[in-house]
Structures are given as C-alpha cells and as structure tokens.
Image (spheres, coloured by chain):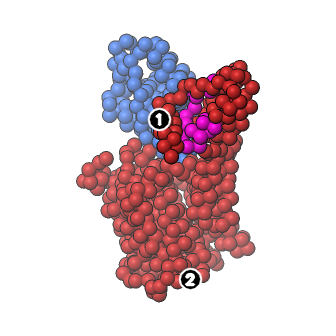
Chain colours: A red, B blue
Amino acid sequence: MQSLKQQWFGNVRGDILSGIVVALALIPEAIAFSIIAGVDPMVGLYASFSIAVIIAFVGGRPGMISAATGAMALVIVNLVADHGLQYLLAATILTGVIQVLFGVFGIAKLMRFIPNSVMLGFVNALAILIFMAQVPHFLGEGTMTYVFIAVTLLIVYILPRFFKAIPAPLIAIILLTAVTFMFNVELKTIGDLGSITQSLPSFFIPDVPLNLETLSIIFPYALALALVGLMESLMTAQIVDDMTDTKSDKNQEARGQGIANLINGFFGGMAGCAMIGQSIINVKSGGRGRLSSLVAGLFLMFLILVLGNVVVDIPMPVLVGIMIMVSIGTFDWGSFKYLAKAPRTDAIVMLATVAAVVYTHNLAIGVVLGVILSALFFVASISKVRIHQNRGVFIVEGPLFFASTQNFIQTLEEAKENYVTIDLTSSHLWDESAVGAVVKVVTKLEEQGKTVKVIGMNPASEKLYKQLLNVSVSH
Amino acid sequence: MYQHILLAVDGSENAVRAAKEAVKIASDASLIEMIYVADFEKAKTEVLHAKSSESLMLERKRKIAPIEEVLRSAGKQFKLTILHGTPGPEIVKYANEKKVDLVIIGSRGLNSLQEMVLGSVSHKVMKRVHCPALIVK
C-alpha cells in the first residue's frame, strides 16, 4: 500500500480538480437524500461536508467519496417520521460506535460471505427505492413538472457527450432555475420542503433523554444503518480498488466510516457512507488520493455558504430529474442477463433480496435475508452426494458432513453384495456426522455378515476418523 | 524492424484478426505487448458481477486467451498489460509514454452501437499516437 504522504500528496492537481467536480455533483444528491429522509436539506449537506472531510483523514480507501447517501436515507425515514431529527442524530452517533466496533473486530472478512447475487439485489433495490421516492414529487403536480423533469433528463444524458468539464446535473440546475425566474414558472422549489442555513455546522449533543427507552428506539435503526453503510462502503471500495488498480484497508475503512458518523452526528448530520456513483465520478475526474475527499467536503461547504440563498430556489422537478438519473445509474442493467444466465439459486437470491427491500423499505433486512438464503442454497448444493455403484464397489462423490450423510447411509445400507468396498477418494469426511455415517454403515453391513472395506480416505479425513473413533472408544 | 509492438485487445473478433497481423509483422526479436483496458464505464458492473477480485482477474484473462493463443502458437515474444481507464486515451497515453514502435488495433471493438454514436476507439488512437498505427479490418 502507498505511504501516507503518497495517499495525501501523490496526485495534488488531479485530486483538487476532481474534488471540486465531486462537490458540485454532491450538492443535488445531498439535498435530495435529505428530502427522502424527511429532514431539512442542511442535515444532508452538513453530513456530506463532515463525512467527506473526516473520511479523508481516517478512511481506508483513498480516492473514495463518502457523504449522505440514499441507502442510509431510506433506512431512517421511519425514525425521522416517528421521533424526529434529534433521535436521528443520536442514532447516527450510535451507528458510528457500532461501525468502529465492527471495524475493530475485522468485519471486512465477513464481506466475503456476501455473495454477488446479494450485492446486485442491494444496488437494484436501492435504485428502485430511490425512484419510488421521487414519484410523490411528480405525480399529479401538473404538466410543467413533467416538462421540467424531461428537460432535466435530456440535459444530464445528452450534454456530457459534448461537454464534460462541469457536471451536467449542475448545469441543468443553473439553467432551469434561471428559466423559472425569467418566465415566472410556478413550480415547487426546495425552499418549499425545507430551509438552507448559510452557516458552518456547530457541535451539539442531540436533545434526547439518555435512557434505555431511547436506546431501544435508536438501536435497531443504528444497527441497520451500520450494516447498510458498511455494505455499500466496502462494495464501493472494491470498485475503487479495481478502477485504480490499488489495494485498500477495508477494516480501516470500516473504522473510518464509524469515526466519521460518530463525529458527524454531533454536528447535526445524518448517517452516511461511501457512494458508488460519486466515487466513480471522482476517479474518472482524476481523483486518486485523500486530498480529493477533503477538497470535495470543503468546497461543498464553501458553496453552501456562498450560494445557500440560491439553492432554495432550485425547482423540485429538476432535483427529481437528477434523482431519476441517479436511480438509473445505480440500477445494474446487466442484472437481466444475470437472471437469465446465472444459476437458478443465485437468481432467486437476487430477486428475494430486491423483493424483501422493496417490501420492507429496509436495505438491511434484504441483505440479511439474501445472505441467509444463499447460505442455505450453498449448503443444499454441496450436500448432494452422488454414489456410483460398480458391483460391490461404491464410489462416493462429494463431501460428507451433517447435511449430506443421509443419502450415503440409505444407499449403502441397501447393498446386496457380500463384499462391499466404499471408495472415498472423491469425498472428504468433514465432521462427526460423516465419521458416524461411515461407522454406522460398516457396522450394519458387517452385522449382516458382509465383508466391508473402506478405501481412499484422504489424510485429513483419516485423521478425523481415527481421532473421533479413539475418543468414542475411550468413553 | 519493429521492436516493441503494442497490440490493443478487447476480446472481440477484430482483436484476434489484429493479433494475426501482428504475428506477420513481428520478427522473432520483437516484443508484442497486448494492452487490455478495463473500462471505467464497466467497472461497477464487472466488480458487482464477479464473485471476487480473483475471479474478475480470471474473467479478463479469459477474454484475452484466444489472442494469446495466436501469439503463442506463432512462437512470438509477448506479454499482457492490463490498464484501467477509458480505452482510447489510455492506449494512446501508454503508447506515447513507452515510445512503442507500432500500434496495432482492430477497427471495431465489442460495442458497435456506442462506436456509431461516439466514433471508434481505433480512429481516435490512430489520430493521437506518435508512432505508426495499423488498423485491422
């Protein structure tokens, strides 16, 4: 891995430029995700500032961008609706604590247990939910709303083909906000949904009673936030690893996410995590080091301080258009091909993850369900033991363990020959059940007066076999 | 004689044909360097669809396998370099930095629709490299 100096100053020019691009691209998203969560735009903007700046110092994946995200916003909707902002901030702090602990105990290893079918389900469900969250903002809002959404989409998709220096969403915002003023178009604006404060975030302790009841309210949310945040962050880290052809410290990233959320909660920000889309924008714009994240955060704050009073005039349909673009970009369009080509069980896991998330509106539930389902499918698939019979020789193919011994026992016990050979060359005895099954079969066949030979046990299986048998003999 | 030949590959039929031309041009002393650019645009999809970073590496190597076979069976010296970025500019940057003697590239890659809209990678490469370029139909 690169030295700390390299991580900070190895790519100064590229990092500063890309940081500025990311800051510009972050603003509409931070505001939109705040609206999804049901809080003031400032909560998402402060979060994006704090997290981007803090993660620059404590993150484990230089060049990755973290801020307020849609995935986290979706988890906290109910908490905000039922208990308000102060509980959200308390939950954010607790999320940080949980993530730090996860990082300390090496959560990154567990990421290996999340199969790609669940990851695909995660991003697809996220895309669907982000889109669904936009529907109330345009359904029944009049023709002009649809026109503005359409124009926004045209701008964000066509303009980048010719001009890439400034993020297209920002151009759409500036252009269309100007149009509403020039032609006096009556549209809902961001100002109608919340206010923008042109000041730096300040430290305060969330105003919640410090008791068990509070904890019981915020803990389930904090746990879900911690899981979702780490999942998206470590997934994004893998993508940045690949794009930059460098390694990252995933456990440090987990701790860093925790530290960022912990501090962020005390400065009035909602929980956040790494962002796939923004991180790709950063790397594409030339960002590689920690400096890019720092610049993104600082420049974002600068823009809010300078332009805060203009931001409230941004028409909602433009923001909705940008969010539709975000959801289209988040969705993995290769998934349709995946559904057709992947093993049936993988396809089912992916669909189940999406269905669970869309039904519960909670990404954490989808992920947990998906992982459990895929683990069950995995056990089911490796517990298939095939037995080829050639006269008295029974060739066992596949691992023998607690879930796979049944078929083995049934087949062998029905052996008719007087001389039976059990060939374990293509098998492996994994546990007590496997050894027990072999012993049981041998005993039963010998009771019937047959001669039984067990051959081809590999060294590890033989060791386990002898070990377990000796133990049972000494009892 | 071309000592250092850069062969741009992407797993398409055209790239295999380009490899066959490279074999004709290369002497036994020349090195054919295959350049595969892992496209930034596809990074997210590729990572999410791969079971692990190791399987993603295998996946990319598999794409190159038919081309490698062409070079190996012809007994040429070759190596594979995987770059990350946007294919056109990345190939140009690498070719100019390494001062290669010749760039060989298939006229059309895998994504013909995109090339209809944006122009072909091979055209851009040809315009911007500082060395001779061979575009193979």
| Element class at badge 2 | helix
Q: Residues within 10 Å of mark 2 (few under 14, many from 20)?
A: few
Q: Is residue A38 above or below residue A272?
A: below
At a point 54% along the width and 54% down the height, the residue shown is A159
**Picture quadrant of residue B115:** top right
Q: Find the magenta span and give its range.
A: A420-440
Please tell me how many numbered marks the rendered image carries.
Answer: 2
Tell me how far mark 1 sits from mark 2, CA to CA: 59 Å
Q: Is residue A19 above or below residue B45?
A: below
| Element class at badge 1 | helix
Which residue occupies the foreground of this view, B8 or A236?
A236
At a point 38% along the width and 18% down the height, the residue shown is B77
The residue to which callout 1 is attached is A463
Locate residue B77 relative to residue A378 in the image: left or right: left
The residue to which callout 2 is attached is A83
Question: What is the three-letter code of the residue carrying label 2?
Answer: His
At a point 53% along the width and 78% down the height, the residue shown is A216
Label annotation for residue B90: none
